Image (spheres, rainbow, N blue to C red):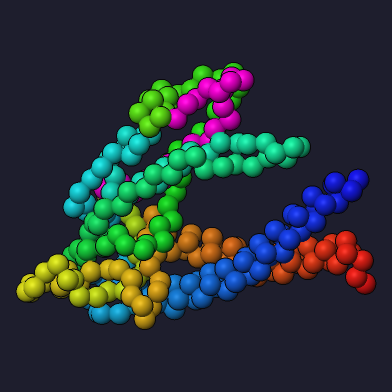
Amino acid sequence: MSDSRDKLLFYSFIGAGFGVWAFVRGWKTLRLTRVIQEIPTSKVRSLALGLAEVSGTIAPLQVIQSPILKKTCVFYHCKVEEYRRSGKSGHWVVIKDLKTFFPFYVEDETGKVLVENSDADVRVHIDLKYQTGSFSSCPEHVATFCSEYGVALNGFWGRRPLRFTEYVLEPQDVVYVLGTAKDNPHVKEFLKNQDNIMMGISEEAPYYVISDYSEKELLQQLSLRTYLSIWGGPILFLACCAYILWYFGIK
């Protein structure tokens, strides 16, 4: 009984810290939500310097193949996790995390603007989510990836419990971009607005989101996360602190 109480005390300290983190993160998400709501979507031709948002299709400058699905893309994020047990519980541990992001143009009916790849908060749909089973056969594209990147599918006791996730942004995908429209340092003199301006991040306005969700879908996601973090974080913190105080006999 004492061991279980000690373990619960350990998780209570972790939970209290996570509750504080979630609360702070919730307020940051709330600020981002309000920024998205307040800024109107601009056409590329009418972009002005400063915080702005645009929407259009991806016109690539350079492409690459994603590691698992072999999709032609300008961005991929591939993650492999392994489920590891610790006593009666367990958790997922990231054993491989691959990410590549090339600059690209966002193009609408009025023109195109360069989108840089530094420090972007990329929020995209999941293109692949696969978890190994004890007896099921592994898809060929997953097996090929494991062979190429040195991920062992089998362990000492049989098939390893692995989870594969891949996100990609492909040419012609429709994307929403919130960021700072600023002078393009890669060019000197161009007459067209699209060549003089690029979308990125600045110290004055540290918001830079690239997403293949629509603005409405993105706002729905952010609102839900804000609600859960701002309310759930303090509740978790108080519950964990109550157990810690009880454990040490403070009333």
Front one among 251 and 51: 251
What residue is rendered at 63% in x and 36% in y?
84
Residue 191, picture quadrant: bottom left
Query: Which region is colored magenta?
Result: 151-171
Residue at 76%, 37% in the rendered image: 88
Give the residue drawn at x 29%, y 45%. Answer: 73
Answer whether residue 189 is magenta in the image: no
Q: Depth check: give the residue in front, 146 or 247.
A: 247
Q: Position of residue 100 (x, y in %)?
A: 32, 48
Pick the residue in front: 89 or 64.
89
Decide if residue 53 is on the left or right side of residue 242. Answer: left
Q: Position of residue 87 (x, y in %)?
A: 74, 37
x and y percentages locating residue 28 in the rendered image: 53, 72
Residue 128 appears in the figure: yes
Please tell me whether residue 105 is drawn above or below residue 50 in the rendered image: above
Question: Horizontal and vertical percent for residue 35?
Answer: 45, 76
Q: Quadrant of the N terminus?
A: top right
**Horizontally, is 229 left or right of 34 in the view?**
right
Name the residue at 23% across, 45% down: 63
In this picture, residue 79 sits left or right of residue 159: left
